Image (cartoon, grey):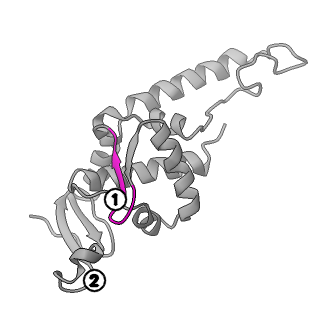
Amino acid sequence: MRLTTKGRFAVTAMMDLAMRDKHTDQPIPLVSICERHGISLSYMEQLFSRLRRGELVNSLRGPGGGYHLARPAEQISVADIIQSVDERLDATLCGGQEDCQDRQRCMTHELWSELNRKMLNYLASVSLDDLVQQYTYRQGGVVYIEEKPRRAKARQQIGDVKARQITGVKMGKMAAVHH
């Protein structure tokens, strides 16, 4: 039983999206999520295609496009995310087919099946908002979200990075400052 990078990256990206989505009406560009977490754009596009089909994100195409959460972070569970990207969490050797040993159910099948149920129940009980709040708390309650200005607005802003202090999580390389 292993959670692969597919599930881990999907949860990380959704958490990033949730932190930014609540503080802006602008769609969040996928490339910015990739840059913040060192994940390849083509891999992330595959994951977000699945997240979109799972109705967890909405996309806006074209210049200024990006993603928003399809529903509030409180209503999206970690299990929803993992299942949307086709991640399979299964501790049994047989994939739940009950043919683990010589096409028969193995002696420990119930143990591993119960572990699967408990794991899924736990992941279903943790919302995206829970993760953001836990991360925020561990970071001392302050969030810095660095945003590169959109091209149309770039001329109006001084410098190439716009930083906003948001109650929540510390992002980027800026020092945390409390209100």
**Foreground of the two, 172 or 71:** 71
Task: From the viewer's perspective, tell me whether residue 92 is left or right of residue 103.
Answer: left
For mark 1, give the secondary structure. loop
Is residue 174 visible in the rendered image? The answer is no
Instruction: Say few, some or many: other residues with alpha carbon within 10 Å of mark 1 (under 14 / 14 to 19 / 20 or more).
Output: many
Three-letter amino acid code of the residue under disc 1: Ile
Q: Which residue is at 39% across, 44% downward?
A: 57
- Please tell me the numbered disc located at residue 150: none
Q: In the orientation shown, which residue stands out farthest toward the front?
A: 62
Q: Main secondary structure of the magenta part?
A: loop
The stretch drawn in magenta includes residue 64: yes
Is residue 68 visible in the rendered image? The answer is yes
- Please tell me the numbered disc located at residue 28: 1
Q: In the orientation shown, which residue stands out farthest toward the left?
A: 179
**Foreground of the two, 51 or 173:** 51
Is 157 located above or below residue 68 in the figure?
below
Q: In the orientation shown, which residue stands out farthest toward the bottom?
A: 159
Q: How far is mark 1 from mark 2, CA to CA?
A: 17 Å
Task: From the viewer's perspective, tell me whether residue 29 is left or right of residue 162.
Answer: right
Is 40 located above or below residue 133 in the figure?
below
Question: Could you tell me if the residues under marks 1 and 2 are in contact, i.e. CB atoms within 8 Å?
Answer: no
Is 85 located above or below residue 93 in the figure?
below
Quadrant housing the C terminus: bottom left
Q: Which residue is at 29% across, 35% downward?
A: 74
The residue under label 2 is: 160
**Foreground of the two, 137 or 14:** 14
Q: What stretch is highlighted in magenta?
A: 61-70
Three-letter amino acid code of the residue under disc 2: Asp
Q: In the orientation shown, which residue stands out farthest toward the right?
A: 102
Q: Which residue is at 53% across, 34% downward?
A: 83
